[in-house]
Image (spheres, rainbow, N blue to C red):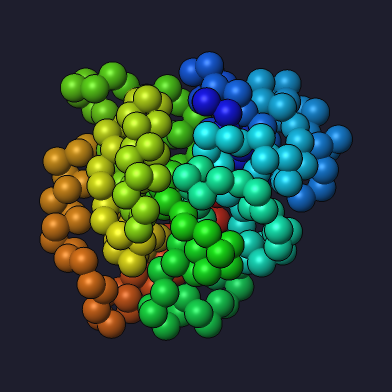
Amino acid sequence: MNIGIIGAGHIGSALAVRLTSLGHNVYIANSRGPETLKDVEQKTGATAVTAEEAAQRGTDLIVVTIPLKNIPDLPKDLFAGVPAEVPVIDTSNYYPMLRDGQMPELETGELTESGWVQQQLGRPVVKVFNNILADHLAQPGKPAGTSGRVALPVASDDAAAKQKVMQLVEELGYDAIDAGSLRESWRQQPGGPIYCNDLPADQLREQLQRLGTKRTPEQHAEYLANQHQQEQAMAAQGIKL
């Protein structure tokens, strides 16, 4: 496949390494221009391009993996001419303490992180790769049926795009679990039991069922409180976002 990755940070670079190793053509971009990505090209095997080129050359799939606060800074015509059937993956998480600052739209719980991203991009997105650490994502996955194989939740309102992304998740060596609509993607956000716990498929399904589909005010408050503790721990441990 031809895959465009917009964002060359830890998650974007880890995905680039994994995807090129599987034989995919990967085009990677950052906000500073392809000339600043020579090291990334050498380490990942991806081709450095501009963000617009990543969107245009990612004819099979596009990944947006930049800090949440920077989503509005993307070119407004980024997806102009990109066919509607090309899935757009969003890997973002809201980190108010470590990176993004307070974002009132996400503090209320009325919108999920990816619901907000979808509004900003003006294009349906698929939420995945947000609940696994970059260092873990960089490691090869495991064959289906293997003990210790990690499951990843995949949420979207676009059934066809979700299915295509789930196939890619499986190819990367993870069990892809349908996590429902984008409105239900709060379950895989920071602060909850699915975030960065590398659960197997049966446990991931159990957690999804236990949490339900509609977020309650109590659940939102619990997630925010847990998230603040997680961010403090991640900062202390120097964990890569």
Q: Is residue 165 left or right of residue 82?
A: left
The vertical placement of 186 against 91, above or below, is: below
Depth check: give the residue in front, 103 or 95.
103
Residue 138 percent across, percent down from the top left: 50, 29
The vertical placement of 102 against 115, above or below, is: below
| Residue at the (42%, 22%) spot, across then down | 140
- Residue 240, quarter of the rendered image: top right
- Residue 71, quarter of the rendered image: bottom right
Depth check: give the residue in front, 17 or 117.
117
Q: Is residue 229 left or right of residue 211?
A: right
| Residue at the (62%, 28%) spot, across then down | 26
Residue 208 percent across, percent down from the top left: 19, 56
| Residue at the (72%, 27%) spot, across then down | 47
- Viewer can see residue 110: yes
| Residue at the (14%, 57%) spot, across then down | 209
- Viewer can see residue 14: no
Residue 17 percent across, percent down from the top left: 57, 25
Residue 104 percent across, percent down from the top left: 53, 82
| Total tally of numbered discs in the picture | 0
Q: Is residue 195 left or right of residue 211?
A: right
Depth check: give the residue in front, 23 or 105.
23
Q: Is residue 19 left or right of residue 128?
A: right
